[in-house]
Structure formats: C-alpha cells, structure tokens
Image (cartoon, rainbow, N blue to C red):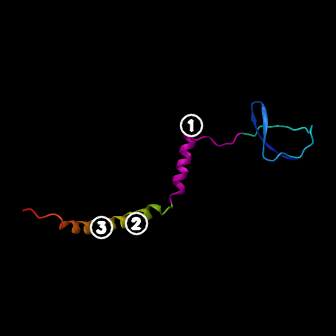
C-alpha cells in the first residue's frame, strides 16, 4: 500500500510531496487523521490552562537538578569583584582632577 499526504483546501485535496506514479483512474480513499492529544497551551480554555500548568510543572521538575543558579551566582560575584576593583581605580584616578576645598 502506498501512502501520500495532502491538505484539504477549497473542497480539493492538494498533494504534498512527490506525486506517486499511479495510473489515471486509480481509486483512492481519503481519511482524516485522528486529532493529536496535544492541547494548544496558548488558549484561554480550562483545558488549555490546565495543560499550561502541567507543562510548567514539568519544566520546573526537569530543571530541579540544574547547576545554573550556582554557576550564575559565581559569574555575578566575579563580575561584581571586577566592578569594585575598577571603581577603586577610577576613583583614585579622578581624585587629582578636582582640588580639595576646605
């Protein structure tokens, strides 16, 4: 059995992909595939909201063992240390530019 795919538009089936080498008059049967069990999580229906919550909970569980927060904290601490070091150097450099008023 050969299978081809198509899209139903304006009352016609438009074939997608290579057209098979079938003889004219070959009988075909068109059946609509069963809808996927997936729900569009961008909608506002109760099912879509429940699906989004389930997706979010699963996402949170998958990141539970991630070391990203610790790595980010180390990067930010190193960046802060460099910033403070630069701040002190800039401060010393501009001290001589302004006269002391007392």
Number of marks in picture: 3
Query: Could you say which is closer to the camera, residue 6 or residue 19?
Result: 19
* CA neighbours of label 1 inside 10 A, class few (<14), some (14 to 19), many (20+): few
Disc 3 residue crowd, few under 14, some 14–19, many 20+, Cα 10 Å:
few
Residue named by callout 2: 74
Residue 86, label in figure:
3
On the image, the x and y values in percent for residue 45 come to 56, 34
Pointers 1 and 2 in contact (CB under 8 A)? no
- Magenta residues, start to end: 35-64
> Which element is circle 2 on?
helix
**Which residue is labeled 1 in the image?**
43
Q: Which is nearer the N-term, disc 1 or disc 3?
A: 1
What is the spatial separation of the Cα atoms under label 1 and label 2, in whole angstroms? Answer: 39 Å
Q: Is residue 97 left or right of residue 60?
A: left
- The outermost residue toward the top is 11
Camera-side residue of 17 and 28: 17
The disc, 3 or 2, on the residue closer to the chain's N-terminal end is 2
Point 54% across, 39% down: residue: 49
**Image depth: mark 3 or mark 2 in front:** 3
Horizontal side of residue 42 vs 1, given as left or right: left
> Marks 3/2: CA distance?
18 Å
């Amino acid at each position: 059995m050969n299978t081809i795919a198509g899209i139903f538009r304006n009352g016609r089936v438009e074939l997608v992909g290579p057209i098979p080498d079938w003889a004219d008059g070959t009988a075909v049967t068109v059946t609509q595939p069963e809808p996927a069990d997936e729900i569009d999580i961008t909608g506002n229906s109760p099912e879509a909201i429940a699906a989004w919550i389930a997706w979010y909970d699963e996402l949170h569980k998958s990141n539970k063992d991630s070391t990203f927060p610790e790595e980010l904290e180390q990067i930010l601490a190193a960046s802060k240390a460099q910033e403070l070091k630069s701040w002190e150097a800039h401060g010393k450099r501009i001290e001589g530019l302004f006269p002391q008023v007392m």
